[in-house]
Image: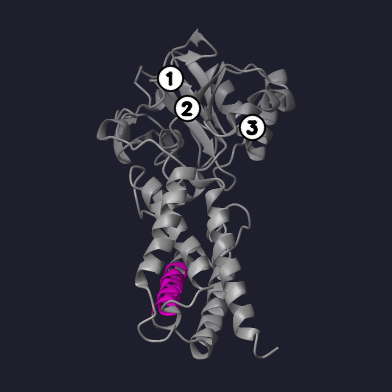
Amino acid sequence: MKKHFPLIVRIIISALFLLSAVAKSFPIWAFEKQLVDLGIADWCKAPYLARLIIALETAIAIAILQKNYIRSFVIPVTIALLIAFCCHLGIQMYEHGAMNGNCGCFGQLIPMTPLEAFLKNIITIALLVYLYKNVKDKPKGENSFITLLFIYFLSAFLLFFAFPFCPCTKEENSKIPAIPILQTDSIKDSNAITLHDTVSNKKTDKVDNKNIVKKDSNVAVLISEPPFTQSKFSMYNNFSSKKVNLDEGKKIVCLFVPGCDHCRDAAKELAKISKSHKLPPIYVLFMNEETYKIPEFFNETKMQLPYFVIDDIPTFFKLLGNKATTPGIVYLWNGNIVTSYEGLDEHKFKADEMVKIIESNQK
């Protein structure tokens, strides 16, 4: 058993890196978004970086099983990579808490908190140190660095081949209009609310108290018709083959993924409140992922809504918002964002709250 233990350790480490690579690949857009949210890359660079990182993990999974420079290069590089990951996780734990969020080490397949991922990496480093002491490179002169390069470049080629994407241009990277979109914020005083430019996140002019109503200490709602403005949704005007101006009047815009269970739950809540309350017209912007599930989505949620599929995934998430996650629901009035919801945490969809805001606008 002792004789074969180093081989067992190599197989375990290889399996961990291979699992990590596969998990990050399905869906690969989720890993791309994580890189963007962390500020490591923008949406133009994220597709490249995501595939190169996954290719590196795949290459390590293969290289750890062979003998070319296993002790003098492969193991030290792998340890250095894990130490870098540990430093990143340490920062995340300091800023957001050790048990908050999914580190993304195993993608969406196996959610892990930063602390769990940190401990996993420490154990893996310990196994690699053991391996370093118990394996040897090939005899001097027989090692081939080209073999290691071949493993990595082949892994990268297969990743780019299996998950093709269209390189973005400067025009595509800025095609969402950088136009101020009014959004209500918490009441700063008893007379006015502060509006924000959601693109630059800068404070803009205040609105007179005749246009708002105080609901509680934190919520202020527009009650008189705001001026028309161009929203970030203005480019979408064709839903289920019908022309629509989302910036005209009151609209509810939903940003959903067809296969997302949480999106379906949000749609069910919308369906429920639509039976007892008069809601503005609802339109759905679907992300181009598992679009074959759209009929199933509407059958399950008991709603048949006009929709449009956004082909470009980065554009979808730019519309959803910085670091935001699905489901997204936005209430527009003449292009102004009156209220919006996203994800599953503090900003998640609150049906009762949105109904109160909408009904306040109808008075």
**Residue 232 can be seen in this image:** yes
Kind of residue at disc 3: Ala
The foreground one among 29 and 190 is 29
Question: Within 10 angstroms of label 2, few (less than 14), some, or many (20 or more) residues?
Answer: some
Q: Main secondary structure of the magenta part?
A: helix
Cα gap from disc 2 to disc 1, whole angstroms: 9 Å
Q: Is residue 349 above or below residue 239?
A: below
Q: Secondary structure at mark 2?
A: strand
Residue name at image x 39 percent, y 42 percent: 188
Kind of residue at disc 2: Ile
**Residue labelled with disc 1:** 236
Q: Earlier in the sequence, mark 3 or mark 2?
A: 2
Q: Earlier in the sequence, mark 2 or mark 1?
A: 1
The foreground one among 332 and 7 is 7
Question: Residue 300, position in %: x, y?
Answer: 74, 27
Question: Within 10 angstroms of label 3, few (less than 14), some, or many (20 or more) residues?
Answer: some
Q: Is residue 227 part of the magenta span, yes or no?
A: no
Q: Is residue 220 above or below residue 140?
A: above
Q: Earlier in the sequence, mark 3 or mark 1?
A: 1
**Residue labelled with disc 3:** 351
Residue name at image x 56 percent, y 69 percent: 14
**Residue labelled with disc 2:** 310
Seen as rendered, the residue at the extreme front is: 142
Q: Nearer the viewer, mark 3 or mark 1?
A: 1
Residues rendered magenta in the picture: 73-90
